[in-house]
Amino acid sequence: MKVGDKHYRTIWLNEDGRSVDIIDQRWLPHDFRIVTLSTVEAVATAISDMWVRGAPLIGVTAAYGVAIAMLDDPSDDNLDATWDRLHETRPTAINLKWALDEMRKTLRPVAPEKRAEAAYARAAEIADEDVALNRAIGGHGLEIIKKIAAGKKPGEPVNILTHCNAGWLATVDYGTATAPVYLAMEAGIPVHVFVDETRPRNQGAQLTAWEMNGHGVPHDLIVDNAGGHLMQHGEIDMVIVGTDRTTASGDVCNKIGTYLKALAAKDNGVPFYVALPSPTIDWTVNDGVSEIPIEERSGDEVSFVQGENAEGAIISVRISPKGTPARNPAFDVTPARLVTGLITERGVAEASAEGLARLFEKEN
Ligand code: MRU
């Protein structure tokens, strides 16, 4: 997507042909910084400390991490050690394991001296595939938006609520939940997005709002607790969120707070959609609540808030008493029964084992 006049992806090969450049998301929306990652350790830090984040982008970054590792030591042992090192960086998003598995599966049969080349090629392919999957998701989501728009007065926008950032910054391009929004804009369908701020890291306030601004999408930032109220008053036509891992039975793990939005949506008859590329489906897991590992991050993310002060410096301020402990589960699980549909690259699936199997039969 565009930043100013320039088209960017979130990750690309550096001109040295071995490192990768990323948009360092820690400083957005205040500062647009690009960072070069040249070692596996740098890639691991960028994922665990959320310089890059969002399930699909985490997967692509890890794939390039494997490629970097193969340059220096293309042995089986190093392939396995790199898989382990990168896999431990974040536990919940399944795209990380998917991408690492893809890289290992591709490289194992390749002679060590040819592995680096094969690794960079596969990482680039995974990145390109992500863009294509998101664009396809956008097309299917657009059909839903069109139907809702058809029931409105001419010119009246379709009001969409989203949580966290499942935008182009969470992927290589387009985003998952935002792809239908961007395609609706392209198609000239009026849309308006309610952006949940998404405490504690504020991915909505800092990232989704920055994206919406950048692309001229009409939007309002709301506090996480406002969604239910707006739904009760008929101000929201649909919810679209992303996901970090969706089970084979359609349970959806996503950023903390998603479950509460789904409950409010159910109570108010607001359709609740989840947009996801197929690498986000964990076919080995059925019950999301008991089986998906939920990342617990530092309580400091709850006790402190980052922002820009009047002088333009990016600072962090404490918002709770010193000595008050904080808990920080980063994700929650929305049971399939609360999900209206899963918008995938192959179409919209019912959130159930049967619904997913109908679309992805051949894979499983
Ligand atoms: O912890 P993050 O910022 O890496 O969270 C991941 C997410 O961006 C969201 O949970 C998102 O909705 C799913 S990823 C498209």
Image (cartoon, rainbow, N blue to C red):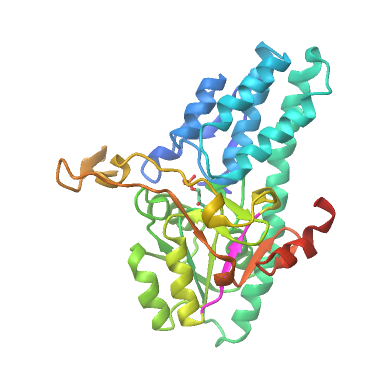
- Does 240 appear in magenta? no
Whether residue 34 is visible to the viewer of this picture, yes or no, is yes
Q: Residue at x 20, y 48 (%)?
A: 319
The relative height of residue 7 versus residue 19 in the rendered view (above or below) is: below
Would you identify the image quadrant in which residue 60 lies? Answer: top right
Residue 227 x %, y %: 39, 71
In front: 39, or 360? 360
- Image: magenta residue range: 270-276
In front: 327, or 275? 327
Residue 258 x %, y %: 46, 61
In front: 155, or 282? 282
Relative to 321, is 137 on the left or the right?
right
The relative height of residue 147 versus residue 328 in the rendered view (above or below) is: below
Would you identify the image quadrant in which residue 228 lies? Answer: bottom left
Q: Residue at x 63, y 64 (%)?
A: 186
Numbered-mark total: 0
Residue 355 x %, y %: 73, 67
Residue 66 x %, y %: 65, 25
Q: Residue at x 42, y 66 (%)?
A: 260
Relative to 269, is 303 on the left or the right?
left
In front: 75, or 235? 75
Q: Residue at x 72, y 30 (%)?
A: 103
Would you identify the image quadrant in which residue 146 lies? Answer: bottom right
Whether residue 8 is visible to the viewer of this picture, yes or no, is no
